[in-house]
């Protein structure tokens, strides 16, 4: 089964995107940095494709303080266990130095990456996306999770990536992998 981790710096709309894609209110959403601290999982379906969706807290790869460091460690675990990363950035504030740190971290991983430029409602796609070209990701899309804009296109991109990764043969494997997930 395909697994997607939603990552990005604090307050870029990761949990809002998680709720939109899962059609739930499982993730808490507020304008308070650090509200999400641990990984949050839900099984969703996009075009009948089963997907594990993983929400994460604000990611600061070089965090030193205890809470931010622990949150970043949880995000690193999510990246290690996923097949594809939805790297969420804020189209209103533009490319941030922490976005560049996250991009450097992700380039070292062997993962499919979709750059999701959130909070792009009413903005020009070309102007907004051009600010993020320096991150080096070719698979990108401007969306607005809170306004449900371009979510259908994001879903199409996710499905197109899944069609080419061989996950549809997992039933034919000789063994089964099991993970037990839950809150502490």
Image (spheres, rainbow, N blue to C red):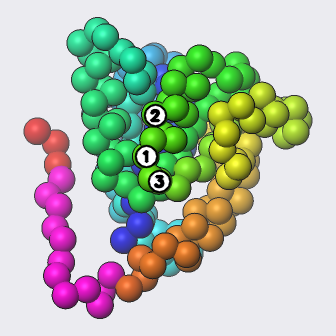
Q: Percent from the top left, x then y, of residue 52?
A: 37, 60
Q: CB of mark 1 within 8 Å of CB of mark 3?
A: yes
Q: What is the crowding at mark 3: few (fewer than 14 residues within 10 Å), some, or many (at least 20)?
A: some
Which residue lies at the image location 32% right of the left edge and 48% below the top edge?
Answer: 80
The residue carrying mark 2 is 105
Q: Quadrant of the C terminus?
A: top left
Residue farthest to the front, as pictured: 108
Q: Percent from the top left, x then y, of residue 182?
A: 17, 49
The secondary element bearing badge 2 is classed as helix
Q: CB of mark 1 within 8 Å of CB of mark 2?
A: yes
- Part of the protein shown in magenta: 170-181
Visible in this render: residue 142?
A: yes
Residue 177 in the magenta stretch? The answer is yes
Q: How far apart are the alpha carbons under marks 1 and 2?
A: 7 Å
Q: CB of mark 3 within 8 Å of CB of mark 2?
A: no
The residue carrying mark 1 is 109
The residue carrying mark 3 is 111
Which residue lies at the image location 33% right of the left edge and 81% below the top edge?
Answer: 170
């Amino acid at each position: 089964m395909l697994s997607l981790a939603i990552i990005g710096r604090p307050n870029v709309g990761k949990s809002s995107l998680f709720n939109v894609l899962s059609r739930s209110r499982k993730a808490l959403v507020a304008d308070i940095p650090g509200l999400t601290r641990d990984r949050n999982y839900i099984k969703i379906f996009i075009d009948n494709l089963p997907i594990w969706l993983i929400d994460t807290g604000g990611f600061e790869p070089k965090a030193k303080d205890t809470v931010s460091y622990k949150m970043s460690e949880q995000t690193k675990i999510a990246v290690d266990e996923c097949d594809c990363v939805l790297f969420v950035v804020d189209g209103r504030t533009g490319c941030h130095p922490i976005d560049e740190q996250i991009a450097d971290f992700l380039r070292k991983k062997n993962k499919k990456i979709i750059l999701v430029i959130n909070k792009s409602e009413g903005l020009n796609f070309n102007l907004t996306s051009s600010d993020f070209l320096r991150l080096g990701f070719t698979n990108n899309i401007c969306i607005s999770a809170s306004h449900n804009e371009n979510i259908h296109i994001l879903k199409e991109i996710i499905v197109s990536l899944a069609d080419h990764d061989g996950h549809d043969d997992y039933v034919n494997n000789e063994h089964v992998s099991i993970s037990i997930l839950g809150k502490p």
